[in-house]
Amino acid sequence: MTDLKKLKNDIKKWSIELGFDQMGVSGIEIKSDEEKLIQWLKNNHHGSMKYMEKHGKKRARPHELIPGALRVISFRMTYHFFDKELSEKKLNDSKKAYIANYALGRDYHKTIRSKLKRIIGRINDHSNIKEKNYFVDSAPVLERALARNAGLGWIGKNTNLINKNHGSWFFISEIITDIELEIDQPSSNHCGSCNECIDVCPTSAIIAPYELDARKCISYLTIENKESIPKELRRPIGNRIFGCDDCQIFCPWNKFAKSPVIDDFMPRDVFENVSLKSLFKWTEKEWDEKTKGSSIRRSGYQGWLRNIAVALGNSEKEIDTVDLLKSKKGKVSSMVDEHIDWAVEQQLSD
């Protein structure tokens, strides 16, 4: 008979050895989160992310995703981040590109998936589930709700998971299992009266505490969105060309964030402290070569140029910026051209 207490301790030990910072176990019941999801979808706050509605309630029902599921083992892994002072400096330099911290290194899906696979290999002898049951932001699962119930942190007003001792600069992932491990205590909420994340959001995407309208979120606009960026939201984007960190940069709990132990997430030189102009000059072939193994591939080359065009429109006015923008006109798509025209107009305005 399996000693479940020992097995749980072993899984925790293995996860730490592989670079995870924390592990916790929850049940599969998240009914209240399911209701919030349904309302969020009804409000169309998911925008063009049709995959969010495709699975509907299944996202809140792990047992429908993995038959026989009884527990969810959640993991937390810190990624590289810049402190508040340096982040503000990067955001205030309109000539430089701001890329969300999580995307500066290797694609986290690849790194974490390989580690979860190793853990699965060790616990499979105790489970009847033989199908793929480990996920890294890759399945219809309400990861944050399950991680909260596993004690990894609370869901903050910015809708990110926040850990009292480690802030929020981390990835979460999970293994869904039929092994009846002891369940951990859920995390309590410590946002209190603080509204810093709501106040600093450049596009006012956090429309109420714990409520995000993705259609206004810069991460959505520059990554998930494959169409034109609404004109009224282009100015607030500033120099953010892939994602946005503001609601984490200014979160008081991130003063407790610890440095990561995984080298994979260290920033690549090609993305760190780089000018918008140099990135805009990349050909599609260069973009393909330099983004291999990176989360940045998610935007696609067309989205990449669209985002940088907007950032160049917001940058310090320089005549060679106009020339550079025009050099790409008519070479990619009409959607990119539209943003180039807008950027040129901003550069030439009084």
Image (cartoon, rainbow, N blue to C red):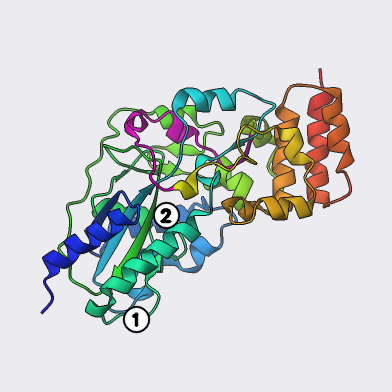
Amino acid type at circle 2 is Gln
SS type, badge 2:
helix
Q: Earlier in the sequence, mark 2 or mark 1?
A: 2
Amino acid type at circle 1 is Lys
Above-or-below relation of 40 to 191: below
Which of the image's four quarters has the N terminus?
bottom left
Tell me the magenta residue range.
240-262
SS type, badge 1:
loop
- Distance from the alpha carbon under mark 2 to that under mark 1: 34 Å
Q: Residues within 10 Å of mark 2 (few under 14, many from 20)?
A: few
Q: Is residue 257 on the magenta stretch? A: yes
Above-or-below relation of 258 to 51: above
Mark in the foreground, 2 or 1: 1
Q: Is residue 292 on the magenta stretch? A: no
Q: Which residue is mark 1?
A: 130
Which of the image's four quarters has the C terminus?
top right
- Indicate the quadrant where residue 292 lies: bottom right
Image point (60%, 36%), residue name: 272
Q: Which is more toward the observer, 288 or 175? A: 288
Image point (32%, 66%), residue name: 119
Q: Is residue 289 visible?
A: yes
Q: Which residue is mark 2?
A: 39
Q: Is residue 300 left or right of residue 166?
A: right
Q: Position of residue 154 (x, y in %)?
A: 29, 44
